[in-house]
Image (tube, rainbow, N blue to C red):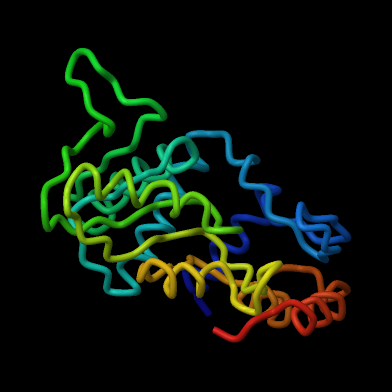
Amino acid sequence: MALTYKEEFIRFMVGNGVLKFGEFTLKSGRKAPYFINTGNYKTGKQLAKLGEYYAACIKNNGIEGETLVGPAYKGIPLSVATAIALSEKHGEEWNYCFDRKEVKDHGEGGLFVGKQLLDGEKVVIIEDVMTSGKALREILPKLQAAANVNVVGMIISVDRMEKGLTSDDSAVNEAFKEFGVKVYSVVNMNNIISAIETGVIEGKEHLEAMYAYRSLYGVNG
């Protein structure tokens, strides 16, 4: 039976050393049975495929927008790759832009490179992962300073579905409550567990630890 794009993406992460299982100490101090290192994406082939999965997430969730915004720096190549995939795989023409770390005061000037944003423009933010919501918190004021845009969603690769350090909500849920921005992920922790259970990827020896971690730190939805 053909794999879903979510199952393909989980295999893709494992195959490229991005998703690993074992015992890892996270920045939060938590001991996790899995780790996601998006820094292991480093080739053109990987980036092209990554863009296809982001595009599939946009299409699968019925997200309608006009412009992809890639927050500097990790979001820049992701937004470009996703725009290309939407064009080549789905025949849809999306704009893209990304922010500068500092406003340019010469040449064309401005804070954004690429599409110059307009009032009412429907934008989708493209990021790698969401831990604390810092990237979203930083890019939203920049977007609103450029134009009164309509942020219709944010796409990340993996939703860890974990409680925050100071609340029982995940970063994804907090983003919606605080900013009204719906965050969509290509996959989440439950998808990864399911992929192990059904043999899409190896790792059944890690299931007990995955269940325990989810029970301790996981959130519903």
From the viewer's side, name the closer residue of 35 and 182: 182
Q: Position of residue 147 (x, y in %)?
A: 17, 47
**Which residue does the image show at 71% across and 67% down from the upper left?**
165
Q: Is residue 95 left or right of residue 119?
A: right
Q: Name the residue at the top extreme.
A: 106
Q: Position of residue 148 (x, y in %)?
A: 17, 54
Q: Position of residue 61 (x, y in %)?
A: 34, 74
Q: Is residue 205 left or right of residue 178?
A: right
Q: Position of residue 33 (x, y in %)?
A: 82, 66
The total number of labels drawn is 0
Q: Is residue 161 above or below residue 149?
A: below
Q: Is residue 175 left or right of residue 160?
A: left
**Which residue does the image show at 45% across and 53% down from the upper left?**
137
Q: Is residue 198 left or right of residue 107?
A: right
Q: Is residue 219 above or below residue 143?
A: below
Q: Is residue 55 above or below residue 145?
A: below
**Which residue does the image show at 28% across and 50% down from the upper left?**
68
**Which residue does the image show at 20% across and 45% down from the upper left?**
95
**Residue 30 placement: quadrant:** bottom right
From the viewer's side, name the closer residue of 191 and 178: 178
Q: Is residue 138 above or below residue 4?
A: above
- Classify the position of the C terminus by image quarter: bottom right
**Residue 112 placement: quadrant:** top left
**Residue 76 placement: quadrant:** top left
